[in-house]
Amino acid sequence: MILRVRGLTINNGSTAMRIFERENYYNVINGYKDLFLVKDHNGRVISPETYIPNTTIEEIYCLFTFDRELRNLFLKYLLIFENSIKSKIAYRFSEKFKESHAYLFLKNYSSADSNRVRVLNLIAIISNKIKQKSDDRNDNPIKHYLTVHNNVPLWVLVNDLTLGNISNFYQALEDSLKDKIAKDFSLQYKKEYGATYQITKDSIIDVLKIANLIRNLCAHEERLYRFKLFNQTRTRYNSQLLSIPRNLLDGRLFTMLALLKLVLTKKDYKDLIIILEKLFNRYQNKFNIIPFNDILNIMGFDPNWKTYF
């Protein structure tokens, strides 16, 4: 086996076979081998690829399962946020614009030139979604409301919009509506944490952008522990809100964890932290070749990460 030639220790061939019977070989090995490969003095993987001595297939698989549990955990709480932001947008938009299908009218969005393409694309996506659902042979809420009421309320429509759609919807709104929705989150945050800073529309946009990327990553079972934004969020405002040093909000997974504090209830956020800490503790001693703290560092978690929450 080529893995043995490259220095990977396979103590039990049957165990390895059982792993690859359950999981895709490419997803396990090609997805998670990086940490276990020998690097040169510049940090580049040497050629041909060679595993660090005593690396086992079980340890690579351990990183794979850790990442899977990490994805499942973050996805759960991202869905809670998704439901919350959808509800707030639907309520505030419908409160201001009461005509049928108000979300299809250009005049109900930001008139800024920089937002024009976003608004037009959003209206096209919503129109196509409604048409698709109305043509569906099976019953669905959108088809029901069109047939019975000749109108699809936004609070019904948002259930069929992706988080990416919702992110664009929020960014397409007039600033006054963005501010009102941000204030809804801010009132909850101030009440539960006694915060003195206001959650701004920019902070909500930051949460939506990174949440959408990570939600898609989780849904497609891609690597989460190595997540890193190419374009960093605006750390100045978020650092003040969260009382977290700006250098720690650098676009890695810790940044997503920190930003979720702004948009989840205190109870949900506390539950997330507790479960995450238990996950870390469970895997702490399962790695031999790669110290678990190195994995935490890759995710942006410093040794004192819990003190910030």
Image (cartoon, grey):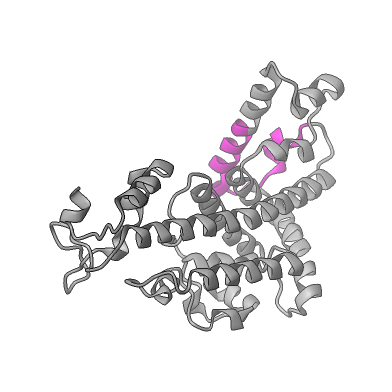
Marks counted in the figure total: 0
* Left or right side of 268 for 229: left
Q: Quadrant of the C terminus?
A: bottom right
* Left or right side of 188 for 308: left
| Viewer-closest of 195 and 175 | 195
Residue 221 visible? The answer is: yes
Residue 176, placed above or below residue 102: below
| Viewer-closest of 162 and 6 | 6
Residue occupying the point 68% across, 24% down = 133
* Left or right side of 154 for 14: left
Residue occupying the point 82% across, 23% down = 150
| Viewer-closest of 120 and 111 | 120
Q: Is residue 121 magenta?
A: yes
Q: Which stretch did the figure color magenta?
A: 101-125
**Which secondary structure dominates the residues rendered in magenta?**
helix
* Left or right side of 307 for 10: left
Residue 230 visible? The answer is: no
- Residue 99 location in percent, x, y? 83, 34
- Residue 222 location in percent, x, y? 44, 50
- Residue 269 location in percent, x, y? 69, 67
Residue 33, placed above or below residue 222: below
Q: Is residue 111 magenta?
A: yes
Most extreme residue toward the left is 48
- Residue 35 location in percent, x, y? 31, 65
